[in-house]
Image (spheres, rainbow, N blue to C red):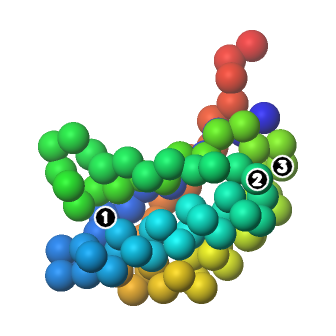
Amino acid sequence: MTDLYVYYRVARPRLTEARAAAAAVLDTMAASSGVTGTLHQRADDALTWMEVYRNIPDADPFLVTLDAAVDAAGLMACLDGERHVERFILCA
């Protein structure tokens, strides 16, 4: 199983839109994959956000669906830069 951590910086003028778009992404992923993601913000920087998706059986198709959800929600238009994806698995 894989855990995905997706972090990015939100453009300050688009903060309200970004919240709605990120919520739409999380809802879409829960409905399409059964994986309930969570949205976090950095403790010392309210514009740095991270989506967390845990226990994903097959990360590659999940990421394809995630990219489509991000596009459909218009999240990229709300960001200051790119989204960064990190994959983690449990240590042996």
Callout 3 environment at 10 Å: few (<14), some (14 to 19), or many (20+)? few
The residue at which mark 2 appears reads as 34
In front: label 1 or label 2: 2
Q: Label 1 sits on what residue type?
A: Arg
Tell me the element at label 2: loop
Q: Earlier in the sequence, mark 1 or mark 2?
A: 1
Q: Amino acid at mark 3?
A: Asp
Q: Kindly identify which residue carries mark 1.
A: 9
Residues marked 3 and 1 touching at CB (< 8 Å): no
Choose top left, top right, bottom left or bottom right for residue 76.
bottom left
Q: Quadrant of the C terminus?
A: top right
Residue 38 image position (x, y, % from top left): 50, 48
Picture quadrant where residue 47 is located: bottom left
Provide the secondary structure element on which disc 1 rests. Answer: strand
Q: CA distance from mark 3 to mark 1?
A: 26 Å
- Mark closer to the chain start, 2 or 3: 2
Q: Residue beneath label 3, please?
A: 58
- From mark 1 to mark 2, how far is it between C-alphas? 26 Å
**Left or right of 68: which side holds 74?**
left
Q: Is residue 9 above or below residue 78?
A: above
Q: Quadrant of residue 44?
A: top left
Tell me where residue 5 appears, x and y as whole percent.
Answer: 53, 47
Q: Secondary structure at mark 3?
A: loop
Give the vertical position of 14 relative to 45 (above or below): below
- One can see residue 30 in this view: yes
Residue 80 seen from this side: no
Q: Measure how far apart labels 2 and 3 are at the Cα level.
A: 13 Å
